[in-house]
Image (cartoon, coloured by chain):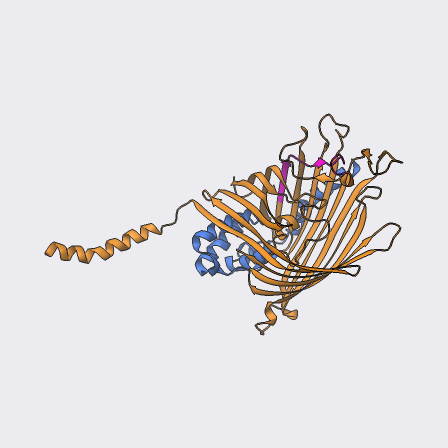
Chain colours: A orange, B blue
């Protein structure tokens, strides 16, 4: 009887000990984050009106921390498009911290070409429901690629300097054999390299002030050969560069946060002669393959307001342009002016009401104006 | 080729500007003394809203801190101070 009583007294303590062991964190951690959005799109293209609810897009991000130096990241994209479910691999790479100043990444990673695609494109971070003209997967600049990268950051006095240099498979030149209208464009993700040449690039960023409110960056990306080995396009090169800036600061006199972002992309692809199956008069043609795109964005949120509703409202405006080469079958000159009112439900969940006016210049004809209104909800996980 | 040289020259000049801006010793020590809370407020907002410390647990913050250090180019010291603050405040 005495033994039973002792066991009964000790049992809760033994249970507590077991529970404490159960919840002891391990060095290895697995985490799922990500983001998603859904909403309503309304378009008016020169008087032709359409509206549709757009299917939810879901982008889970998997993080596997092996230890305090090694982490694996991967992002999948699930999106409904034309009654189909599209699944994409945005990135999947391993990252290893060598020391305080050097980290190595390998795999498919977001390229630090400017900051928009690497840091700002997720729907819960992007202040608008669409991307600026010329940015994104179909843009004139790379968003991700497969290769190896070295990056890091270190203080320089009161400033912080960050850098990234990488070598990747590089882009592939679209020759027009499959899609004549896209001859001369670059296809940036090469799962299998089309030649022995690799693209090299990098970005250097400077945060000159100790409060990190301002960052200016410069990126360059060069591929000595974007053509298929042995083809008539073998040896065509591409040089791209970008400048970016960011200023985010809570300013007491205006009782809120000012958020300014901008990026300029420039692309110059070497000369090449393309076939034009749609024009018998000119069997072949060439053009100066130069493109550019930029955006400038301004946001204000009265975060210091005493009003609970007002402090969660954000006013944003953005201007973006895209210029593609004259003489190409994809030549164009587009600009877009955007306005938005965002309401933040929490630090990572937002309702966005955006209005866009896009103007496309058409040679020898009137401009095509597209008005768009988006009402979207986005959330970060 | 001239363009490439110009681009490289600009790229090389950026660290020079950084060194030029780093002259003041008093400001330097001020930057070193920043707390995790200050760094959390100043750096997260560069891309997204400031997260609540209670949004994740200590273990998650370790993983997120390492991920953000690499993605957002934080220094090792900034990462450590921010994670320590988030763990102490959640």
Name the quadrant of the N terminus of chain A. bottom left
Residue in the picture at 84% in, 51% down: A362
Q: Quadrant of residue A311?
A: bottom right
Numbered range of the magenta stretch:
A163-179
- Let me know if residue A175 is in the magenta part: yes
Report whether A338 appears left or right of A310: right
Quarter of image, res B1: top right
Q: Most extreme residue toward the front, as rendered?
A: A83
Estimate the x, y position of residue A144 in percent, counting from the top left: 63, 42
Q: Is residue B59 visible?
A: yes
Residue in the image at 59% along x and 40% along y = A108
Task: Give the quadrant of residue A376.
Answer: bottom right
User: Is A350 a magenta residue?
Assistant: no
- The picture places residue B14, in percent across and down from the top left corner, at 69, 46
State the residue in front, A238 or A161. A238
Residue at the outermost top position:
A230
- The x and y percentages for residue A18 are 28, 51
Name the foreground residue: A54 vs A129. A54
Q: Is residue A211 visible?
A: no
Q: Is residue A90 left or right of residue A49?
A: left
Q: Nearer the viewer, residue A56 or A190?
A: A56
């Amino acid at each position: 009887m005495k033994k039973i009583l002792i066991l009964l007294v000790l049992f809760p303590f033994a249970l507590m000990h077991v529970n404490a062991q159960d919840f002891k964190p391990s060095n290895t951690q697995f985490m799922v984050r990500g983001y998603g959005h859904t909403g309503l799109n309304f378009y008016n293209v020169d008087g032709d009106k359409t509206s549709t609810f757009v299917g939810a897009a879901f982008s889970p991000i998997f993080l596997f921390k092996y230890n305090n130096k090694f982490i694996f990241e991967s992002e999948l994209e699930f999106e409904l498009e034309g009654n189909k479910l599209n699944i994409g691999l945005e990135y999947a790479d391993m990252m290893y911290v060598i020391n305080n100043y050097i980290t190595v990444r390998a795999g498919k990673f977001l390229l630090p070409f400017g900051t928009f695609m690497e840091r700002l494109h997720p729907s819960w971070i992007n202040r608008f429901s669409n991307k600026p003209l010329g940015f994104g997967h179909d843009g004139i600049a790379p968003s991700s690629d497969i290769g190896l990268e070295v990056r890091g950051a270190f203080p320089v006095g009161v400033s912080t300097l960050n850098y990234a240099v990488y070598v990747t498979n590089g882009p592939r030149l679209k020759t027009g054999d499959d899609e004549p209208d896209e001859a001369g464009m670059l296809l940036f993700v090469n799962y299998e390299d089309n030649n022995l040449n690799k693209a090299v690039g990098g970005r250097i960023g400077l945060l000159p002030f100790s409060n990190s409110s301002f960052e200016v960056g410069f990126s360059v990306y060069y591929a000595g050969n974007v053509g298929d080995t042995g083809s008539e396009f073998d040896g065509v090169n591409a040089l791209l560069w970008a400048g970016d800036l960011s200023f985010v600061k809570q300013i007491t006199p205006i009782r809120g946060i000012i958020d300014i972002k901008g990026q300029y992309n420039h692309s110059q692809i070497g000369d090449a002669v393309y076939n034009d199956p749609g024009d018998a008069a000119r069997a072949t043609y060439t053009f100066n393959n130069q493109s550019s795109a930029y955006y400038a964005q301004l946001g204000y949120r009265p975060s210091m307001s005493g009003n609970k509703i007002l402090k969660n409202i954000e006013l944003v405006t953005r201007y973006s342009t895209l210029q593609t080469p004259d003489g190409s079958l994809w030549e164009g000159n587009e600009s877009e002016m955007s306005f938005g009112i965002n309401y933040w439900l929490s630090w990572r969940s937002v309702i966005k009401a955006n209005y866009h006016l896009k103007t496309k210049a058409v040679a020898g004809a009137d401009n095509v104006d597209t008005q768009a209104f988006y009402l979207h909800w986005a959330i970060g996980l | 080729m001239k363009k490439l040289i110009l681009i490289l020259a600009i790229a090389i000049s950026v660290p020079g500007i950084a060194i030029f801006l780093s002259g003041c010793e008093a400001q330097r020590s001020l930057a070193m003394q920043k707390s995790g809370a200050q760094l959390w407020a100043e750096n997260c907002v560069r891309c997204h809203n400031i997260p609540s410390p209670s949004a994740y647990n200590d273990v998650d913050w370790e993983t997120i801190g390492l991920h953000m250090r690499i993605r957002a180019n934080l220094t090792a010291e900034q990462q450590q101070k921010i994670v320590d603050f988030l763990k102490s405040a959640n």
